[in-house]
Every structure is written in structure tokens, then in C-alpha cells.
Amino acid sequence: MADVEDRSKEALRTWLRLLSCGTVIEQRLRSLFRVNFSVTLPQFDVLSELERAGQPLTMSDLSRELMVSNGNVTGVIDRLEKNGYVSRTRADHDRRIQYIDLTPKGAREFSRMAELHEEWLNDLLAELSVPDMKKLQKLLLKTRLSAAHE
């Protein structure tokens, strides 16, 4: 019985630690993107996905890759388009389909954002050595697989 109680307590502590670490890092990144680029983390994620794809993507492609609803992506794209970071083009074969692409300005700004994002992550995780990070990645993968199994 004590083993079950200990395991339950440790599971709760682990969950709370994972949650707090993720929250702290996410809040810090949100703040840094807002202050340095006046963009949100979801906007950065969309720009990142477009850069990674190397070609225009449909709204559905973006929603699927980012694991969010089409409605969420539409709002993010609206703001990015207003700032000149992305453009929309309707498909010739089906006018309901919109392709989203980085503009030259969007590509330039994303490059700057990505460079600073890398620096910020290095700073945020500075207390972890490379072997620590690799070990943590393995443990987090194991955790994700365990959680997805249920």
C-alpha cells in the first residue's frame, strides 16, 4: 500500500513539475516575442511551419500540422497578413481553398525571430548540460508514449 501511495505522490509531483516548467518557459517566450517582435507565440508557430514547409500551405494543412482548429489559424493568419508577413492566394481549381505563403518581409522577420528564439532557448535551459537535455528528451518521450497509450 505504501508503494502505491508513494508512486501516486511522485506521479502528482512529476505532473506538477512538468506543468510548471512548460508554463514558465512558454510565458517567457510569449513575453520575449511580444516585446521584441510584437508577435504572439502562435504567430511564430505559423511562420515556422511555413518556413519549414518551403511552399505555400492551405489553412487545413496549417491546422493539422499545428494541431489547432481552422478558426484559430484563420485569426492568426489575419494578423500576420495585416502585418505583411504572409499572403493568401485562392486555388484556381477550388476558390474555397486558400494557400498561405511567407512574404519576403515575413521570411526576413522569421529569420531574425528564429535566431533569437534559439538564443532564448539556450538561455532558458542554460542550467542543463547537453547530456542532461538528451536524458530529459528520452524521459519526456517515454512520458508522452505512456500518456498516449491510455
Image: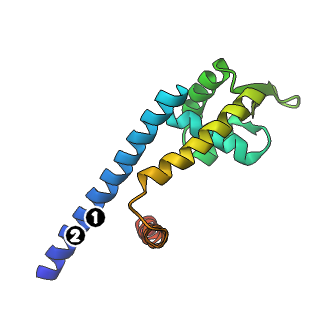
- Percent x, y for residue 11? 25, 67
The N terminus: image quadrant:
bottom left
* Separation (CA) of disc 1 from disc 2: 6 Å
Element type where label 1 sits in the image: helix
The C terminus: image quadrant:
bottom left
Q: Which residue is mark 2?
A: 10
Residues tagged 1 and 2 counted as in contact (Cβ below 8 A): yes
Q: Can the viewer see residue 103 in this picture?
A: no
Residue 106 or residue 50, whichever sits in front:
106
Tell me the crowding category of disc 1: few under 14, some 14 to 19, or many 20 or more residues within 10 angstroms, Cα based.
few
**122 relative to 35, above or below:** below
Left or right of residue 8: residue 92: right
Left or right of residue 59: residue 120: left
Residue 54 sits in quarter: top right
**103 relative to 8, above or below:** above
Q: Which residue is mark 1?
A: 14
Residue 95 sits in quarter: top right
Q: Can the viewer see residue 6 in this picture?
A: yes
Residue 7 or residue 47, whichever sits in front:
47
Q: Amino acid at mark 1?
A: Thr
Tell me the crowding category of disc 2: few under 14, some 14 to 19, or many 20 or more residues within 10 angstroms, Cα based.
few
Element type where label 2 sits in the image: helix
- Percent x, y for residue 113? 60, 38
Q: Amino acid at mark 2?
A: Glu
**6 relative to 22, above or below:** below
Query: Residue at position x 68%, y 39% from top?
Result: 111
Q: Which mark is residue 118?
A: none
Query: Residue at position x 52%, y 25% from top?
Result: 38
